[in-house]
Image (cartoon, rainbow, N blue to C red):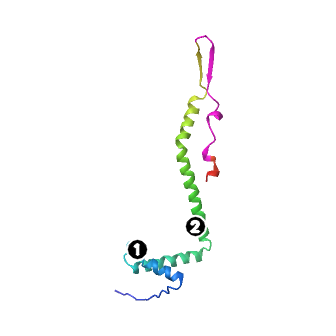
Amino acid sequence: MATRNHNFRFNLDHDEERRAWEILHSECVEQDFKSQNRFVVKAINDYYERHLKEKAEPYLSSYEKEEAFVERIIKAVNSRLFENLPQLIGQYILVSGLSGFNVRTSQTNSNTMQESVPEKSDVLEENDLLDFDAF
């Protein structure tokens, strides 16, 4: 087995180095990785891979931020849609099922009264999905 040894020093007077020391010795690292050595190797490889991507594509972090923003918008719209889905289905069924429905009933005094379906605009209230202030 070909192994190499390299020592690192952490100056605890420097915030960045103290933070690295604390992360290296944290419970999370102990639980999630087989060893501190595996954590350091993975951290170095991930960091360098990211460095090369940013070097090749200077706007990589901007693209990632934009993509995350779009994902948040999609999640918000989907959750809002599914929250209002039963109401929308009910309104659709009510409007489509009753459109053009006229009933004539007679009262005891032989007067004729006509019931008609309210207009679609009366049945449909303001659509919450189009309320962009809620986001």
Point out the image quarter for the C terminus. bottom right
| Element type at mark 2 | helix
The residue stretch that appears in magenta: 108-129
Give the residue at mark 1.
Answer: 27
Percent position of residue 54, x then y: 58, 75
Compare marks 1 and 2 and give the one earlier in the sequence. Answer: 1
Horizontal placement of 38 versus 13: left or right? Answer: left
Q: Amino acid at mark 1?
A: Glu
Image vertical order of residue 93 relative to residue 29, above or below: above
Q: Are marks 1 and 2 in contact (CB under 8 Å)?
A: no
Residue sitting at 58 percent across and 67 percent down? 64
- Residue highlighted by disc 2: 64
Q: Which residue is more in the foreground, 118 or 57?
A: 118
Amino acid at circle 2: Glu
Could you tell me which residue is drawn at 63 percent across and 19 percent down?
A: 114
Q: Is residue 87 magenta?
A: no
Q: CA distance from mark 1 to mark 2?
A: 29 Å
The picture places residue 111, in percent across and down from the top left corner, at: 63, 12
- Residue 4 placement (x, y as % from top left): 40, 88
- In reply to whether residue 126 is colored magenta, the answer given is yes
User: Residue drawn at (56%, 30%), measured in percent from left and top?
Assistant: 97
Question: What residue sits 60% from the left and 67% below the top?
Answer: 63
